[in-house]
Image (spheres, rainbow, N blue to C red):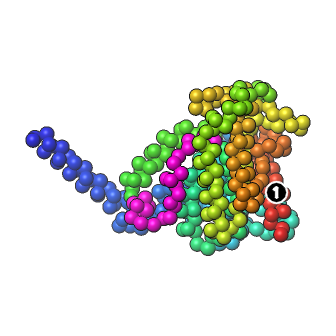
Amino acid sequence: MKIAKVVGINVLILTVLLTVVELFFGGWLIERNVLENYNIVYSKTYHFDVSKIYPEGGNVTYTRDKYGLRMSGKSEPGFAEILTVGGSTTDQRYLSDGLTWQDAMHAELSKSGLQLTIANAGIDGQSTFGHLKNFEIWFPLIPELKPKYVMFYIGINDFYIDAEKWAEITDIENTGFKSEIKNKSVIYNTVRKIKGALNSRVVRVSHSKIDFSKLTYTTKPLLDSSRYRSILGERLTGYKARIEKLALLAQKMGAVPVFISQPCRKYRILDNGTIEGTTETENYGDVKLNGVDYFYMLSIMNEMIKQVCEEGHYPFIEFTPKTIWADSDFYDYVHTTPSGAKKVGIEMAKSMLPILKP
């Protein structure tokens, strides 16, 4: 009985303390910006020293407006004809304002007489799971955001995301008491952030400097090509379903969904079409991959995007197999230098022109 009494008192004290924490630090008494709970930076300007990441780096300026966007063109998102959605390769945290691929794309389109505003909604580390949540939680908070095109620059982050039950993300309406808890509860969101931080450790996409001159390459994969689909497994089914949902959400917004596959420097494609991959290996479940394996498996995931686009008659732009990339375009396997971002932006503009002109 004494033990039960002590446990009961401790539970009561803990409940009172948690209630106090919720009331004072949550959004129940004081209205707080929902973006705070979802790691979306807004109304901030940061200065980063990136000289150790890429030679021409130095100090860069990274700005997010009050809605959490990086803008190319007019400053208000209501003017944005194009919304770009993706992870760190869309966000480009370590590229200065004015040097992102969206800026280069904006400049290139201007040369063709198209003065279009581009809103950058890239979030470092996001996969298609996060992109779906953007449509639920973030984009509805941005007044008059009605882009004509939503460009999804995706693939690499989802390569490492384990398949989840599709039922968990089919209901994305931001309503009801459950939604109130998600938006206002400081305890819920603290636990969610810790869980997200732990889960993110399995995603092998991070900012770092790679000396490509020291890498060795091979044309031979470690795995038999017949195994690739079985290794990817349910990831493919879930990935395709999420892409289909993203396309529908873009259309619901009144926009045309445009999907772009991503390049990576774990492999390089020679002018004669030969695939050279890094001999450096990584663990993917219970198998090891080299750069050649990575290219072929990423290409299989891109096939899922292509299928969705063919079935829905959406534009699909392939960057993964292009031969235009050079080592100097990347500071690590996936993130571009300013010169690389400019090349991406110019290629984006060229690819989008036939879509935009009509």
Residue at x 21% of width, y 50% of height: 13
Q: Is residue 181 magenta?
A: yes
Secondary structure at badge 1 equals helix
Residue 152, by quadrant, is bottom right
Residue 213 is situated, as x and y percent measured from the top left of the image, at 78, 30
Split into 4 quadrants, where in the image is the C terminus? bottom right
Say if 117 sits above or below 182 in the image.
below
From the viewer's perspective, tell me whether residue 304 is left or right of residue 170: right
From the viewer's perspective, tell me whether residue 56 is left or right of residue 160: right
Residue 92 shows up from this direction? no
Say if 224 sits above or below 115 in the image.
above
Residue 304 shows up from this direction? yes
| Residue nearer the viewer, 293 or 78 | 293
Residue 233 is situated, as x and y percent measured from the top left of the image, at 61, 39
Q: Residues within 10 Å of mark 1 (few under 14, many from 20)?
A: some
Query: Which amino acid type is marked by label 1?
Result: Ser
Residue at x 89% of width, y 38% of height: 271
Residue 91 is situated, as x and y percent measured from the top left of the image, at 65, 53
Q: Is residue 24 magenta?
A: no
Residue at x 58% of width, y 68% of height: 142
Residue 86 is situated, as x and y percent measured from the top left of the image, at 65, 53
Q: Residue furthest right?
A: 272
Residue at the disc numbered 1: 351
Q: Residue furthest left?
A: 1
Magenta residues (range) = 157-184
Say if 85 sits above or below 231 in the image.
below
| Residue nearer the viewer, 44 or 191 | 191
